[in-house]
Amino acid sequence: MLDLNFVRDNLERVRAALEARRAPTAALDDFAQLDAERRRVIAESDELNAARNTASRRIGALMKEGRKDEAEAQRQEVGQLKERIAELDHARDAAEANMRTLLSTLPNLPHESVPVGADESANAEVRRWGAPPEFDFEPKDHVDLGASLGILDLERAAKIAGARFSILRGAGAQLERAIINFMLDLHTREHGYEETLPPFIVNRDSLFGTGQLPKFEQDLFKLTDERELYLSPTAEVPVTNIYREETLDAGRLPLKMVAYTPCFRSEAGSYGRDTRGLIRQHQFEKVELVKLALPENSYDELESLTRDAERVLQGLNLHYRVVTLSTGDTGFSAAKTYDIEVWLPSQNTFREISSCSNCEAFQARRAQIRFKRATGGKPEYVHTLNGSGLAVGRTWLAIVENYQQADGSIRIPEVLRPYMNGMEKIVSSER
């Protein structure tokens, strides 16, 4: 959430930033009206408080002079002033509450380095790594490959749960597990992240803290009981909220955490987009990287987090590129995002496999995650960062497509073979 005082003092700057994001700005007009009302009632309350203090001193003087009837009349006037002041204080609190509600609907402001643009067409490529594989045959997509090998079953998954679910079988399921373990080992042993295993169900406060609520409730799977719990859409939610409503010592920062979780998204409004195979599922798995950092270091931490995610693709020898998202393509909570896009031969293009974001103090302010410096001073908000390290299903399909052989088999990347009991190739298995 944006800082209330910052928005109040920089209303037109905030408006320009939201316009750059192609975000509605009507809430700012309502915010300004509420702020004007708040200022008016505070001014009136101050005047009445001054009058009440004057009257109270007058009452004391009248009592000393023995003029009790006049003092009693004055007391009645003070009582009326108190009632009016209470009404004004209530109006002030209501205005401030409504201002904060409006702020909860506004996205983060983009960092100055983010390219300005309406959508993904304005994203800026930063770098590429590796080269696409060369085939002397027409490469297939992961759906056809998985079906022919008996490792991907979409039809039976639909029978169990409906469209956009999948079953991985045999070596396909083993490959998924190998990818997860490889990622976790890499990030914990070489990149210094603490492994966590959080709840897969989260409450409203957690989803508000990371920005999914209230704006994106339609994209969530909600449990149908009175507890208002949701299936987690990403490990960013439970892991970031581990330290919700806590004040940390600055010396502990950055905190670096990694978690494997399944993720659940209703993907409302996305029908017709990327619905074939594993690209966009209602249930999928991720290994997520989360950092809590000092504000002055957070953009260095974003660079290193992005490099940590890239190391997974480098280890798998998968061709990819990194792009900076434009203002119009940046997510709700992020101030700056790098997308890592892996090469898919079947589509002859790059597709997103990770988004690495610095949310600055936006989530921390919503979740009340602070830190205190050793030098003293008031607690400050941490900067939160997150990124997929990586999306497991998309890594699975990238391996299947990039490592396919002419006979329809799939060669296993060398770094994954120890996790697959030395298996070098996935071959057909009748199911």
Image (cartoon, rainbow, N blue to C red):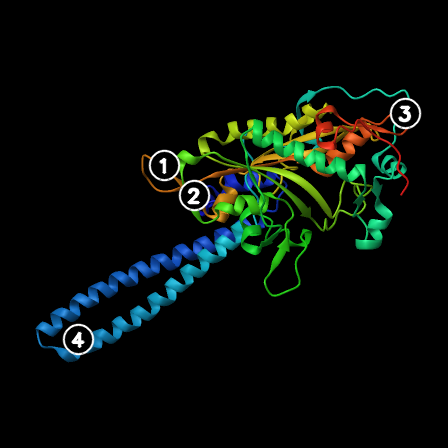
Instruction: Determine crowd level at label 2: few under 14, some 14-19, many 20+ residues with C-alpha closer than 10 A.
Output: many
In the picture of the structure, the residue carrying the numbered disc 4 is 71
**Element on which disc 4 rests:** helix
> Which of pointers 2 and 4 lies earlier in the amino acid sequence?
4
In which image quadrant can residue 169 be found?
top right
Of circles 3 and 4, the one toward us is 3
Residue 137, image x, y percentages? 91, 23
Q: Is residue 207 left or right of residue 54?
A: right
> Which of pointers 3 and 1 lies earlier in the amino acid sequence?
1
Residue 233 visible, this angle: yes
**Element on which disc 3 rests:** loop
Instruction: Determine crowd level at label 1: few under 14, some 14-19, many 20+ residues with C-alpha closer than 10 A.
Output: some
> Which of pointers 3 and 4 lies earlier in the amino acid sequence?
4
Specify the label residue 406 is tagged with.
Answer: 3
Of circles 1 and 4, the one toward us is 1
Residue 310, image x, y percentages? 65, 27
